[in-house]
């Protein structure tokens, strides 16, 4: 995660993701940003809980950002719970009631509404945990060796 000196260079959605990831640690979740569960989809934040639960959090910084997103329902088969993360001025009435809601800023977040739980099948959970682990390991490797070129456009 970036330090405070890097915050001005982050995009609004990245600032929300930062606060969400910080908050999820208080619930004993670890998280990665911009993970691709399957071709054509990239989630803003994927979180892995202490019991193997998988949450997807989609960060929306504005009404137009939300209204231009037509892929979010494609994320549902890849997680146990789905959440939107928005800031305090976002018009939350736009968000579907049957999804989770997190209010966030660059420093923290609060879960306002839990997303309904739809448990992943064991085989899909295994695949997602492996993707999560590989993604996290690649991110750590790049942090240690910034000149590293990742194959297949990863990261």
Image (cartoon, grey):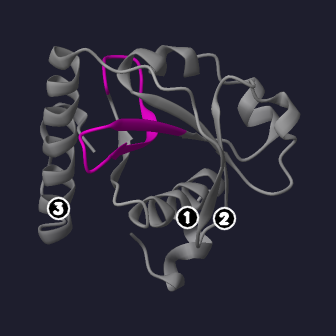
Q: CA distance from mark 1 to mark 2?
A: 5 Å
CA neighbours of label 1 inside 10 A, class few (<14), some (14 to 19), many (20+): some
SS at mark 1? helix
Residue 154 sits in quarter: top left
25 vs 69: above or below: below
**Which is closer to the viewer, label 3 or label 2?**
2
Q: Earlier in the sequence, mark 3 or mark 2?
A: 2
SS at mark 3? helix
Residue 105's tag is 2
Q: Which residues are magenta?
A: 37-57
Percent across and percent down for residue 8 are 62, 74
Q: Are marks 1 and 2 in contact (CB under 8 Å)?
A: yes
119 to the left or right of 63: left
Residue 71's tag is none
Q: CA distance from mark 3 to mark 1?
A: 20 Å
Picture residue at 31% right of the left edge, 25% below the top = 37
Picture residue at 13% right of the left edge, 34% below the top = 130
Percent across and percent down for residue 146 are 19, 66
Q: Earlier in the sequence, mark 1 or mark 2?
A: 1
Q: Are marks 3 and 1 in contact (CB under 8 Å)?
A: no
| Residue 55: in magenta span | yes
Foreground residue among 48 and 143: 48
126 vs 74: above or below: below
Q: Disc 3 marks which residue? A: 140
Q: CA distance from mark 3 to mark 2?
A: 24 Å
SS at mark 2? loop
Picture residue at 51% right of the left edge, 40% below the top = 57
Q: Disc 1 marks which residue? A: 19
Percent across and percent down for residue 75 are 46, 21
């Amino acid at each position: 995660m970036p330090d405070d000196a890097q915050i001005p260079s982050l995009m609004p959605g990245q600032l929300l993701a930062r606060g969400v990831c910080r908050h999820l640690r208080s619930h004993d979740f670890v998280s990665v940003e911009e993970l691709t569960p399957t071709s054509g989809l990239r989630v803003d934040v994927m979180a892995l809980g202490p019991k193997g639960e998988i949450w997807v959090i989609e960060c929306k910084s504005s009404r137009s950002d939300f209204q231009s997103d037509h892929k979010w329902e494609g994320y549902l088969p890849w997680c146990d719970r789905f959440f939107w993360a928005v800031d305090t001025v976002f018009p939350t009435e736009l968000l579907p009631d049957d999804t989770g809601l997190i209010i966030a800023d660059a420093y923290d977040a609060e879960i306002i509404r839990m997303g309904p739980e739809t448990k992943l099948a064991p085989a899909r959970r295994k695949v997602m945990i492996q993707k999560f682990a590989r993604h996290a390991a690649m991110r750590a490797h790049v942090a240690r060796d910034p000149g590293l070129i990742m194959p297949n456009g990863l990261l």
